[in-house]
Amino acid sequence: MAQASHSVTVPVSVNQVWDFVSKIEKWATLVPAYKEHEQIDENKSVWTFEGNMKGLKKTVQIELNIVELSEPNNIKFEFKGITENFSGSGQFQAEAHSDGTKMTGTVEATAGGIAAVALNPMIKMVLPKVTTRLTEKIARTLQSVGVN
């Protein structure tokens, strides 16, 4: 299983981070390769990603479930592929610091089935970049527009 984590300190309160990351609709568009998502219920949503890999355009759908909301510090989620055989989990953690809030995004994923031999090395290579980009984008958004 590939795992990646990235931390950044943002000059806002823990409660402001919580207000943003606890609502998927506020940060969904910041996920790399995001195309759209559909909220099924309070905790369940279906996400569509579209990307190019070596000249091939690929669309992937996942089901994402929020499994724990611990206000104001931690959100845990799990996901599984709908169109591809992979699964994983992740979380956002927020910790108050003197200069704001340390926010950490962590994601782990693994592929299954016949394609696992080819996909797992690719996941291991891409996951750190995706996790860093998402965490940094959330931090920049929190800094520039605040949380409404």
Image (spheres, grey):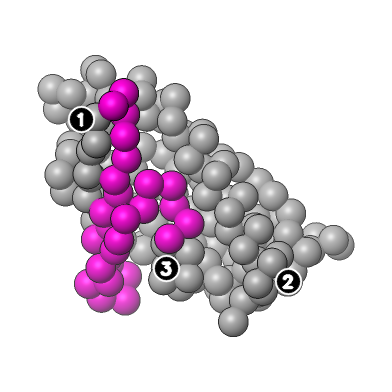
Q: Is residue 51 magenta?
A: yes
Any mark on residue 112, and which? 1
Q: Which residue carries the number 2 mark?
A: 13
Where are the magenta residues, as a range?
A: 29-55
Q: Amino acid at mark 3?
A: Ile
Q: Amino acid at mark 2?
A: Ser
Measure how far apart labels 3 and 2 are at the Cα level. 19 Å
Residue at (36, 20) in percent of width and height: 121
Q: Residue furthest front?
A: 55
Within 10 Å of the Cα at label 1, are there few (<14), some (14-19), or many (20+) other Cα atoms?
few
Eye-nearest disc, 3 or 2: 3
- Above or below residue 94? Residue 62 is above
Any mark on residue 18, and which? none
Measure how far apart labels 1 and 2 are at the Cα level. 40 Å
Q: Which residue carries the number 3 mark?
A: 24
Quarter of image, res 143 = bottom right
Give whichever of discs 3 and 1 has the lower sequence position: 3
- Residue 30 in the image, given as x and y percentages of width and height: 48, 57
Within 10 Å of the Cα at label 3, are there few (<14), some (14-19), or many (20+) other Cα atoms?
some
Q: Residue furthest right?
A: 98
Residue at (25, 19) in percent of width and height: 118
